[in-house]
Image: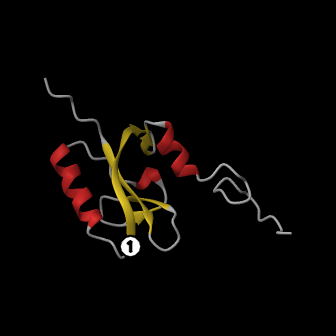
Amino acid sequence: MARAFTPKVVTANDLLDGDVIYQTADDRWSRVLSEAELITDEAHAQLRLLDASRQAARVVGAYLADARPGPNGPEPVHFREDFRRTGPSNYAHGKQETSPQPRT
């Protein structure tokens, strides 16, 4: 018996700065997961991934990531995707940084 398709988002890294980005329903790339298109159809997901893979001048490493609907948009299912959306765990470089720290 075939496994049921789980909802997905298309994610990649921005080619120029390496930041995690997500494909939106209106063909933009966003750094905010909640703005991503939540894809519930397997064929549509493959088409969206193919479209993202053709954007080699903008993105690198596009793939489909499992997601679930949340109150504000898609939410990650796996720890890896939750970690990717918040950035590195060191505060001097991660998205968690709230104020710039002087470099010594």
In the depicted structure, whether residue 58 falls above or below residue 45:
below
Residue that badge 1 annotates: 58
Q: Give 66 or 104, whichever is nearer the viewer.
A: 104
Q: Position of residue 87 (x, y in %)?
A: 59, 53
Q: How many marks?
A: 1
Q: Position of residue 39 (x, y in %)?
A: 27, 47
Q: Is residue 15 rendered to the left or right of residue 3?
A: right
In the depicted structure, whether residue 19 falls above or below residue 74:
below
Q: Position of residue 44 (x, y in %)?
A: 18, 51
- At a point 44% along the width and 71% down the height, the residue shown is 15
Q: Residue furthest left?
A: 1
Q: Residue furthest top?
A: 1
- At a point 66% along the width and 48% down the height, the residue shown is 89
Position of the C terminus, as image quadrant, is bottom right
Q: Residue furthest right?
A: 104
- At a point 39% along the width and 68% down the height, the residue shown is 59
- Name the amino acid, label 1: Arg
Quadrant position of residue 48: bottom left
Q: Give 96 or 80, whichever is nearer the viewer.
A: 80
Position of the N terminus, as image quadrant, is top left
Mark 1 Cα-neighbour bin, 10 Å: few <14, some 14–19, many ≥20: some
In the depicted structure, whether residue 49 falls above or below residue 104:
above
Quadrant position of residue 24: bottom left
Q: Is residue 77 rendered to the left or right of residue 84?
A: left
Q: Position of residue 76 (x, y in %)?
A: 45, 41
Q: Is residue 100 rendered to the left or right of residue 19?
A: right
Q: How is the image coloured?
A: secondary structure
- At a point 45% along the width and 52% down the height, the residue shown is 33
Q: Secondary structure at mark 1?
A: loop
